[in-house]
Amino acid sequence: MSYAIRIAVSEVRTMRGDTSGQQEAFSYLNLEERVPADHPLRTIRARAQAALKRLAPLFDQMYASGGRPSIPPERLLMAQLLIALYSVRSDRQFCESLGWNLLFRWFLGMTLDEPGFVQSTFSKNRERLLEHEVAPRFFAEVLRQARAEKLLSEEHFTVDGTLIESLASLKSVRRKNDDRGGPIDPDNQGVDFHGERRTNDTHASVTDPEAKLFRKSRAAATKLYFSGNAVAENRCGLIVDFAVDDILTGERAAALRQLTRRKFRRIRTLAGDKGYCTKAFIAALRRRRIRPHIAFIEDGRRIPGLDRRTRRHATYRLSQRKRKLIEQAFGWIKSVAGLRKSRFFGRARTELYALIAMSAYNLTRMARLRPLRT
């Protein structure tokens, strides 16, 4: 009887497993086998590598022919894509997770034994990326792939803008004629600006002078903002142009500048919300032979070029439905890519990360619409 009981206890321990075993001294692990074959990162990685391969001549010009080898710029751009895709809060957090995250190492083409890099690597190379305009070219290469796969519309587009809060604090706002140096609030007692009228004509931020004071409505608080302006095509909702501008530029002026810069030769319709429903903007579109599919404000106003003859067609109603796709892109870069508030000071650095985040959004959309077999 006791012998049978001992056998049963031994079997229970065997089925349970042992957690006190010694770790293996060597591990033969292939990261390629650890990533599922249908993982969406496989498609994103393949398309991103194809875009970076076409930028190889530019990368050769960015670095000297001799000296100590640096971190490859391709790896830095791929790391920025991961930061946007996985909502990593900062470069420092990404470098810390690179030590244990096998998926990140696979995406960057790193081995398990290869050492990572520190966050200062991003800071030192960011100026080089800005100087050679790498982010706009990478964004354009991703669009080139989408156009080759017939995912882009060449005739129907949507414009819209969004607010990007600056990293600078309201404590940094001073009068423009204030030439005092040093910290703004050295004792951290708080800056008392109650009763003082502050406008963009008289005040500016000392840490981010390019950001401007703005508020969304009368009930909202005044903050320092940039303006993010995008152009999306209406077939799949991919972003074909994005720019970070001065908030005082205005959505309509930014949209016309983007249409001029991109030179959409076959554009036929342009959709937009009620913020673009003005006589001057509609007339500017008509001069370019573009049909305005702008949301109309029903208050009795008359706008030449946007009458009932334009709004009665089914294509107008279709454009109004399709223009919601650009809001999905804004929601993605703010909630997933963390661009509700900028991570950097200055418009140029904010636009650099915004273009990479928009490239990540386009790659994610393309992976869903047309996944690759890798």
Image: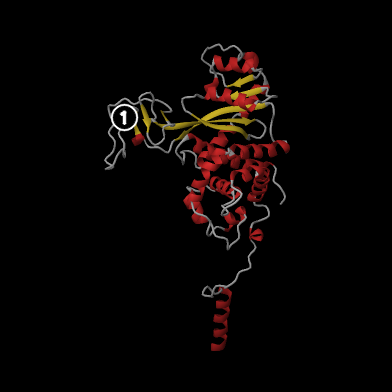
Furthest-front residue in this view: 66
Say if 137 sits above or below 41 in the image: above
Amino acid identity at mark 1: Asp
Q: Quadrant of the N terminus?
A: bottom right
Element class at badge 1: loop
Q: Is residue 332 visible?
A: no
Q: Which residue is mark 1?
A: 178
Residues 157 and 74: in front is 74
Residue 165 appears left or right of 12:
left
Residue 326 appears left or right of 197:
right
Kindly indicate the quadrant of the structure image that contains residue 187: top left
Residue at horizontal 49 percent and vertical 46 percent from the top: 123
Say if 167 sits above or below 86 in the image: above
Q: Disc count in the image?
A: 1
Residue at horizontal 53 percent and vertical 18 percent from the top: 297
Residues 310 and 243: in front is 243
